[in-house]
Image (cartoon, helix red, strand yellow):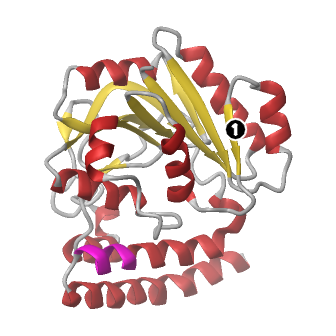
Amino acid sequence: MDVSVIIVNWNTAQITCDCLESVYQQTDGIDFEVIVIDNASSDDSVAVIKEMFPQVVLIENDDNAGFAAANNQGMTVAKGRYVLLLNSDTIVLDKAIEKTISFADSHPEAGIVGCRVLNEDKTLQLSCFMFPSILNMALWVTYLFKLFPRSRFFGREKMTWWNRKDEREVDVLTGCFMLVRREAIEQVGTMDEQFFMYFEETDWCYRFKKAGWKVVFTPDAEIIHLGGASSKQVRIPMVKQWRKSMLLYYKKHKRMLEYLSAWVLITLFFLTRVPYWWLKGKT
């Protein structure tokens, strides 16, 4: 089998079905399977998926295991020579999965391959990043990357100056579309389940690169990513989870001084943003 497409669902029945429909409509030149892990949804996701897509391998969790753990569940039963981690709020365009596999087949040094990601209105969504660092975080806290998006310095973390129209090796690919080589997973291991949500793909990419695999972006394929379909349902807890995951990444991979500096910068970020968010909510 060429690829196992793994989709994690949590209370997004219609969006997940739209994603599944796009996968089946746009993927016909390769041998593939689709694995959906439902993280204890309280809506009718399970019933709807079973009815509309009986060919899907559906794993039903009794509790919300988190994004990393759910993807790992999918990887344990996956049969493909590649696994594709695909967010439930994505739409596959113009045979994107086949194109990405073709690219990966011609680049055996690539452990992970990502594609071009678009917003719903077809504008570019930034989907490649540099690894976290204190400098990158400081630039992010000040929002200088928004003032100078074409600057290779101020826009360095999100690579805001790059139009994503050429192939290149990157540090981190967004977790909404990650094609991962099975041999690389067997060497590096699956996602770290300490990351309930956020930064699990950053940690994974770091481990792949440390093991000698390349993380590569190709513009040959495109998808639409709606963004935050599940996290919007619990916005405040997800903000807290994002903060926790970022600090976990620093604690795991950085020196103590950098970890403490990250604490300071994140605190500064929220101290300067919370009053604005509060006032905005009042208007």
Observer able to see residue 113 = no
Q: Nearer the viewer, residue 249 or 220?
A: 249
Task: Answer above or below: position of 129 versus 240.
Answer: above
Q: How many marks?
A: 1
Q: Which residue is rendered at x = 17% and y = 52% of the image? A: 211
User: Residue 52 vs residue 251: left or right?
Assistant: right
- Residue 110 place in picture, x, y as percent: 21, 35
- Which residue sits at x=42%, y=21%? 2
Q: Is residue 110 above or below residue 270?
A: above
Q: Amino acid at mark 1?
A: Leu
Q: Quadrant of the N terminus?
A: top left
- Residue span colored magenta: 247-253
Q: Is residue 140 left or right of residue 208?
A: right
As helix, strand or loop, the secondary structure at mark 1 comes to strand
Q: Nearer the viewer, residue 158 or 62?
A: 62
Which residue, given by chain and number where applicable, does mark 1 sit on? Answer: 58
Viewer-closest of 277 and 247: 247
Residue 45 appears at what percent x and percent y? 80, 43
Residue 231 left/right relative to 40: left
**Crowd class of label 1 (few under 14; some 14 to 19; many from 20; radius 10 Å):** some
Coordinates of residue 27 in the picture (x, y in percent): 52, 16
Point out residue 257 in the picture as x, y percentages from the top left corner: 20, 90
* Magenta stretch: helix, strand or loop mostly: helix
